[in-house]
Image (cartoon, rainbow, N blue to C red):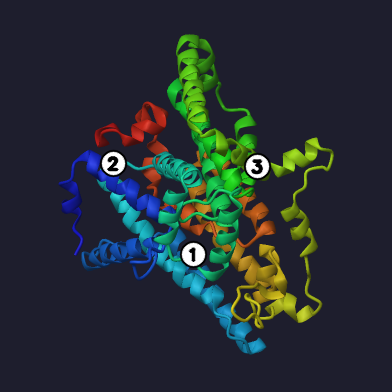
Amino acid sequence: MLKHNYFSRLSGGLKKLLLLILLFFYVYPIEFVFLPFHTRNMIALLGFFWIYKYILDKKFVINKWVFYGMIISISIVLLSCLTMIINMTSDWFFVRQVIVNILTFCSVFCIIKTFKSAYRNISFYHIANWFVIVVLIQMFITLFMFMDSSFRDLLTDIQRVDLLIADRLGVIIDGGIRFVGFGSFFFGAGVTNGFSLILISLLFKKKTGIFSSLFYIFCFIVIMSVGSIMSRTTLVGGAIALVVLLCPPKNIQSLYDIVINKKKLMTTLGSLIAVVMALVILIPEEMRLDFTYSIEYGFEMFVNFVDGYGFMTDSTNELLASFVFPNRIRTYFIGDGYFAHPYAVNEIRYYMDIDTGYLRLLFYFGLPGLFLFMLFQITPILYAKKCDPNNRRYFYSILLYIVILNIKGLVNLFPYTILFVFCEVSRVRNFSVDSMKSGLLSSLGDPSEA
């Protein structure tokens, strides 16, 4: 049985190292070949024992917003069963998805308890900082995987991936243009990268330190550039992040501090430029051409625009061509009960060969199901806004992100947004910029600083 005092005996540095490892394998649920299931579910087991202990000690209290999420989840299960009964199908995708969300809840409970063992007070900004650090680490792993084929093969071979990803992964690795990460592939990678870019924009708006601001700029550039070559969906989050950054702040202290302290500004900028130049020099000459092709792929939309073809890519053209709407009125009310293609054999295909998330939901369980799914996605971010009015930017930016991404594919941001539901209301409201001192890197300091 897990005991809180066991973690209390660990030093501050070890607690943060444990937190970093747990959060990395939570954000990137890697299914190792030597484990029975992926890492997020392994963390869920720890969270389950923790919750069980809290129930025995009569300390476990369900937040009303978590209760709302449970009611919506039960409604999704009941509607899924109803559409399968009416359409005489057996596609249990959304029933399984609810089970996955329950396991995610247990995982997050473990993550948050680890946070609390490392910090006296946790806030929205603590969690956002650590999330950005995890994604930044993934970006460097991705770069090393691209530059060193043996390292890439090692990390790829120890993972167990599904049939669709395995087929696409083989083609991409052979082509050598698109980046692949460690447990981070394709559209899902873009969703995670874009989410982190939005968090960076919110953190940048909040901080006042010069080093913190420039560090966030560095993180933004790295995640935006590397992430876009992993998946061009990253650009959606990057665009929303830029909108957040361009919105007039309540005060101009951050900008003032950067401009007024020119000496520190030039020193830090010079260091960043030196690091970037060193990285470019270290890239073998034979790989620079591959990098050129990769950059052209990641920013194909802008390359096409410069060439006079407009803001378009092959994938956006395919997406527009795949729009198919129901031709039966009944489908709009109860759906057809299919998420996967019913006649696909030894391959993974979506029903009606549709990529768009909204249409997948519509064909599975109609407009009621689409409404419930979107309500489930909105509930965690609405809670964050209710906790702290200062989180308005977070609410509107993530809401816009969800709305746009579901045009491209079905997106479930619950594993990320649920992290911020566990921030205690009083501590979020009492949080100040000064308590974080030097920004992102202060998250790695002594717990007494939090």
Camera sees residue 266: yes
263 and 291: which one is in front?
291
* Disc 3, SS: helix
* Disc 2, SS: loop
Tell me the residue at 69%/78% (across/down).
335
Return the x and y of residue 430 as percentages of the image width and height.
38, 36
Vertical position of residue 250 compared to residue 190: above or below: above
First-in-chain label (2 vs 1)? 1
Could you tell me the amino acid type at mark 3?
Answer: Tyr
Q: CA distance from mark 1 to mark 3?
A: 44 Å
Return the x and y of residue 95 as percentages of the image width and height.
52, 76
Quadrant including the N terminus: bottom left
* Disc 1, SS: helix
**Label pair 1/3, CB-CB below 8 angstroms:** no
User: Which mark is on residue 293?
Assistant: 3
**Label pair 2/1, CB-CB below 8 angstroms:** no
Instruction: Specify whether 172 is left or right of 108.
Output: right
First-in-chain label (3 vs 2)? 2
User: Which mark is on residue 391?
Assistant: none
Q: CA distance from mark 3 to mark 2?
A: 44 Å
Tell me the residue at 64%/73% (across/down).
349
Location of mark 1 (residue): 69
Tell me the residue at 84%/38% (across/down).
308
Return the x and y of residue 179 as percentages of the image width and height.
55, 48
